[in-house]
Every structure is written in structure tokens, then in C-alpha cells.
Amino acid sequence: METENLALAVVVLAAARGLVDGIDARTRAAGFDDLRPAHGFVFARIAAGDAGISELAAHMGVTKQAASQLVDELSRKGYVRREPDPRDGRAKIVTLTARGVAATRAADQAAAELVGQWRQTLGAEAVGTLLDSLGRVAPAGRLRPIW
Amino acid sequence: METENLALAVVVLAAARGLVDGIDARTRAAGFDDLRPAHGFVFARIAAGDAGISELAAHMGVTKQAASQLVDELSRKGYVRREPDPRDGRAKIVTLTARGVAATRAADQAAAELVGQWRQTLGAEAVGTLLDSLGRVAPAGRLRPIW
DNA sequence: CCCATTGGTCAAGCTGCTTGACTTTTTGAT
DNA sequence: ATCAAAAAGTCAAGCAGCTTGACCAATGGG
């Protein structure tokens, strides 16, 4: 049976999985053991500029309710804060606490380590090419947990 | 805040997500609208050689019970069959039915179309390099739904 | 000025996975 | 040959994380 093309897809998924697992494991080892991979996307979005619940939801491709629950959890655990939006009485702005910033840093460092391993295997130039290529074929849209 | 490395990880995830979504959408459009992406991994494993429940579970990184349920569902929907293993009275071999083979073909063709689009964007050579590189950094292990 | 839209929450429900307990068959060490 | 331990699979129950549905408060275009 010719499943070569599926196999190609599988390689991309395996690489993604390797990254997610690696970042998760290292972040936990760094003391943030109450975080799940999905939380990383919240942090990533907030780090790119404060955001409201609806923006987070859109960014992750989930419902507002789900995003709200995630923020609840992160808030309970001390990683983010909900603040009223001075410009819009309905909206609330989600901000990283100091702990949230620390966790983001840890995750980023974990990612750096993993990409560093890629460089050891492939060489710096090949990694550059790889990421450039992926950037051009990856859809811009939602960034949600895959399935 | 320096989250560049996280951003690199995000690109890989986005590419993976694009593939999964694309394959899922095309496979559904081809008439297999009662399949979820996770089912693809069952098919991929079986297509690579008949397998038992435990092997499927290990391959997907889930418990035997979860794998058993998946096979239940696929069996109910007519994609696979459970057959007793002649060599081991405990084991059961999971095989693709004709419909299962057809679905696998549809998924493979969908993957081929998507990779074809990549070739249009990047060129055939770059796609080859890309997949070769990913193959060398992707961990061999589990192939499960990412989170 | 009003009403459709938007941001957000509360509540309930469901799906897909997990842990736990069990049966049957195989393996392997004595 | 025997018997304990391991492995394949299933049944049952529970739970986490998401969904749909209903709702309130604030906004803003006509």
C-alpha cells in the first residue's frame, strides 16, 4: 500500500510532538509543574501584547468559554491576572504576573535548547532553511491544540 | 520579551496543524465524514502491517483501553475487523476492511495534494530537504495526538 | 435613542481519555 | 512438569477539557 505521503505528514507531526513534549518536560523540570502545553499558547499570545478573553479564544481556536476557563485556572495558579480594560467596560485584559513571565522565559529557554539540538544534528544553516520553509507553508491561522 | 525560540516552535506546530486539518477536510469531503484525525493513525499503523490492540496503543501513546475503544468505533463503522491471532490465543489482529483501505487511500491522496501545494510554494527540491531534515530531528517514538 | 453586536460569565452536557479490577493465555524459571 | 509472573484484551467507572445554550452588561452605528 502506498502511504508515502501520509508518512511525510507523520514526520511533521512527530517533529511537532517532539517539540511540545520537550518544552513541556523542561518547563516542568524548571519548577512549573502545574502547566499544560496548552497554557503555553496563552502565554505566547499575552507575551505578544496584552489580550482579552475573546482574542485569546480566537487565537487558540476555542470558544470564549474555554478560554475563560483556561484563564481562570492560570489565574488561580498565579500566572496571570485579570484587569478591567479602561477603554471598554465589558472587556478584561489578561496580563502575566511575575511568575507568568518566569514561566514564559523557561518555556522559551526550553525551546532554545531543543532548536539547539536541531542545529547540532543538521547544522545552523539547515535549521534556518527549515524554519524559513515551514514559515512559508504553515497557515497563519489558529494555533490550537491539534486534535 | 524574547520569545523567538517559542515562535520557532509555533511555526512547526502551525505546519502540523495545517496538514492535519487539510487531510481531515479532504478525507471527509471524499465521503469518509465519520472519521476523526486520530483514526488516521490507526490506519497508518495497520497499513504498515497488521497489528494488535497493544501495538496500536503503544504506537499512539495511549492506554490499551483507549485503543480498544477506537477499534470498537472503527469496527462499528465498518473500517476494520478484529480477528483472532492464530499464534496467540489472547491476541486479536486488527485488519482493514475494503472501506478501511479506501479511506487510507483517500487520506494518502489528501496528503499528496497538500505536499504538492508545498512544492508549488517552495519548489520540489526544498520540500525534499525539508522532509529529510525533519526526519532527522523528529523523535521516532509515539505518534499520538499532540495534546 | 435604540437595538443589534460584542466581551464575558454561569451552568449543564458530552466525548475521549484515564485508572482500576478482572479473565484468559503465554512465558519462563525452577 | 509446575506454577508464578507477565502480557493481551475487556468491562466499568471517573474525570478533564471542551462544547452548546442562556444570559448580563457595555458599546456603537443607524
Image (cartoon, coloured by chain):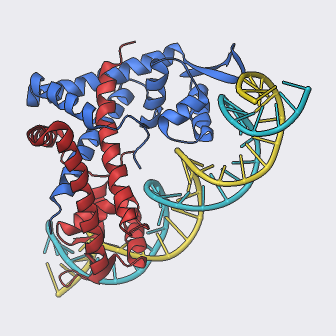
Chain colours: A blue, B red, C cyan, D yellow
Q: Nearer the viewer, residue A72 or A68?
A: A68
Residue lying at 35% horizontally and 44% vertically, measured from the top left: B17
Residue at x-position 33% and y-position 44%: B18
With respect to residue A142, does B76 lie above or below? below
Q: Is residue B21 left or right of residue A128?
A: right
User: Does residue A21 appear anywhere in the picture?
Assistant: no
Q: Nearer the viewer, residue B73 or B105?
A: B105
Q: Nearer the viewer, residue D4 or B20?
A: B20
Relative vertical location of residue A49 with respect to residue A54 in this rendering, above or below: above
Query: Considering depth in this image, is A142 or D10 the residue closer to the camera?
Result: A142
Q: Does residue B44 lie above or below A20 as drawn?
A: below
| Res D4 quadrant in image | bottom left
State the image coordinates of residue D11 (x, y, percent, origin top left).
Answer: 50, 76
Q: Position of residue B89 (x, y in %)?
A: 25, 83
Q: How many marks?
A: 0
Residue A17 appears in which quarter of the rendering?
A: top left
Residue A74 rendering spot, x and y as whole percentages: 56, 28
What residue appears at the point 37 percent right and 50 percent down from the top-left corner?
A: B21
Left or right of C30? Residue B54 is: right
Residue A138: which quarter of the image?
top left
The spot of residue A2 in percent (x, y) is: 14, 65
Does residue B44 appear anywhere in the picture? yes
Q: Could you tell me which residue is drawn at 30 percent across and 64 percent down?
A: B42
- Quadrant in which the N terminus of chain A is drawn: bottom left
